[in-house]
Amino acid sequence: MVKARVQIMPKSGVLDPQGKAIAHALASLGFSGVGEVRQGKVIDLELSETDPGKAKRAVEAMCEKLLANTLIESYRIEVQG
Amino acid sequence: MVKARVQIMPKSGVLDPQGKAIAHALASLGFSGVGEVRQGKVIDLELSETDPGKAKRAVEAMCEKLLANTLIESYRIEVQG
């Protein structure tokens, strides 16, 4: 079994209202010195595939088809053998 | 300036309907061999603090107060000097 973690972030230049909301909330709670905040998603997957290379390619296909909106989001895949 | 990344995941044992929905959607798209799927959040922060240790402690306080619901979520902080 292979475990994969996908991190999906809004591309730079894409508006991120969730990130902005967090930045405002942190400021109003008294946390100073916080600049830009961006929020994205993490998805952990357990795959029955045992070959890390094949698993990574499968997760890439999942990202392209379902997990990420590649117009506005970029993704990074980490596979733990 | 220090950049911090926070990864927030539902604790094991906590129901994760988003993860379940992703697993079902992947199966119906024909991706086989996908076991458990869990979805969490990533939050990237830019901090004006320059000391990585102080920055990490500040982000820990942010997680406890706002970013994570520590009853049902666990978080991990990475600070890039």
Image (spheres, coloured by chain):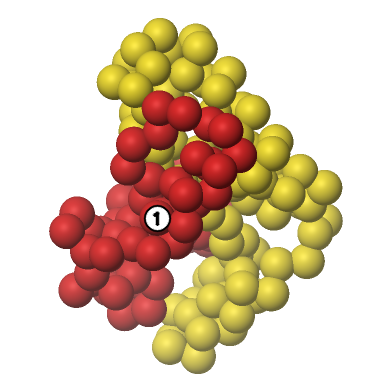
Chain colours: A yellow, B red
Q: Nearer the viewer, residue B80 or A50?
A: A50
| Picture coordinates of residue B30, whole percent (x, y) | 57, 33
Q: How many marks?
A: 1
Measured from the top left, where is residue B14 in percent x and y? 22, 64
Residue type (three-letter) at the residue carrying disc 1:
Lys
The residue at 39%/72% (across/down) is B67
Front in this rendered view, residue B38 or B77: B38
Look at 82% across and 56% down and name the residue there. A13
Location of residue A41 in the rendering, given as x and y in whole percent from the top left corner: 53, 54
Mark 1, other Cα within 10 Å: few <14 / some 14–19 / many ≥20:
some
| Above or below, B30 relative to B25 | above
Question: Which residue is at the front of the view, A56 or B59?
Answer: A56
Q: Residue at 19% of width from left, 54% of height from top?
A: B12
Q: A52 above or below B75?
A: above
Give the side of residue A72 with respect to residue A18, left or right: right
Q: Please give the residue where the numbered disc 1 appears in the rendered image.
A: B20
Under tag 1, what secondary structure? helix
| Residue at image location 70% in from the left, 36% down from the top | A64
User: Numbered disc 1: what chain?
Assistant: B
